[in-house]
Amino acid sequence: MTQAIASLINREVAGADTLTAYRQPLLGFARADDERFEYLRREVEAAHVLPVDLLPGARAVLSFFLPFERWIVEANAAYPETVAREWAVAYVETNALIGRITAGLIAMLAERGIRAAAEPATHNFDPESLVSRWSHKSVAVIAGLGAFGLHHMVITDAGCAGRFGSVVIDAALPELEPSPLESKVRCLYFHDGSCRVCVARCPVGALDSALDGDSHIDKRRCYRRLLAVAEEYRSLGLVDVCGKCAVGPCAFGPAV
């Protein structure tokens, strides 16, 4: 079944009628009873739902990453403050593509008698706390796709420049082994303190506190920036995106 899931994702990406281009998608899996889902709710965010909240009887979770092609990343890296139109378009098109992928997976699995559920790629967060009820990035880490960097992006084998999606299913995957509880360090700052590019590139200083020993991003400062960009690109839809922290040394792969 894992091969069928991977094949559908690859077909959807290869056949996508988008201006945005992608590198090879990544796919990971986790058991629905992985203790880190409970940890997310207990220690990180009480509002974060569990797989069984999204789908009663959930037994596994799949996570996928759609990495952007190099030219999209380079376009956004070329400007210190202005978000490149290529990046803005990639955000909108990829969110829509993730929606098509998850809908396709749910339909394919239903044909096999398997129930599945998914959350939208974005805009599933509380507007006051700015916390997602289902963090696709945290799910990706639990599924073994990567590890968080100083910039609060997940650094995968294909880097951090791209978008995540995930689906919860009620079927066990016999071949699924629990992913390691401790993710390998992929961020140069966490490795030896030698890189702060993401902090320097943030136009509003939302990551400054991370260098003071505070692991939290200033979400409100970051979100105000995203809303300003959304206003600039309102003709494209809701483009609350920036990505300046995601176009550094770890954009295309781990820097460690």
Image (cartoon, grey):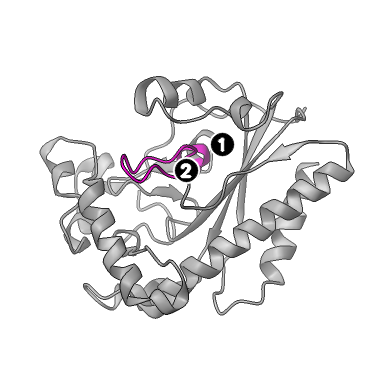
Of helix, strand and loop, which one carries label 1? loop
Q: Work out how far the residue at label 1 is from the one at label 2, CA to CA, in angstroms.
A: 8 Å
Q: Which residue is drawn at 39% across and 79% down?
A: 85
Which of 3 and 9 lies nearest the eye of the viewer? 9
Q: Which residue is farthest left? A: 212
Indicate left or right for 206 with 35 as reference: left
Q: Residue at x 35, y 60 (%)?
A: 246
Query: What residue would you read off at disc 2?
Result: 146
86 up-or-down from 93: above or below: below
Which of 170 and 77 lies nearest the eye of the viewer? 170
Residue type (three-letter) at the residue carrying disc 2: Gly
Q: Can residue 24 be seen in this view?
A: no
Q: Where is residue 198 in the image (x, y as percent from the top left)?
A: 24, 57
Dominant SS in magenta: loop
Write the start and end of the magenta stretch as one range. Answer: 125-140
Q: Can residue 220 be seen in this view?
A: yes
Q: Residues within 10 Å of mark 1 (few under 14, many from 20)?
A: many
Residue 112 among magenta residues: no
Residue type (three-letter) at the residue carrying disc 1: Ala
43 up-or-down from 250: above or below: above
How many numbered dots are placed on residues in this image? 2
Which of 189 and 139 lies nearest the eye of the viewer? 139
The part of the image, by quadrant, that contains residue 23 is bottom right
Of helix, strand and loop, which one carries label 2? strand
Indicate left or right for 31 with 154 as reference: right
Indicate left or right for 140 with 172 as reference: left
Q: Residues within 10 Å of mark 2 (few under 14, many from 20)?
A: many
Query: What residue would you read off at disc 1?
Result: 143
Q: Which residue is farthest front? A: 128
Q: Where is residue 87 in the image (x, y as percent from the top left)?
A: 41, 72
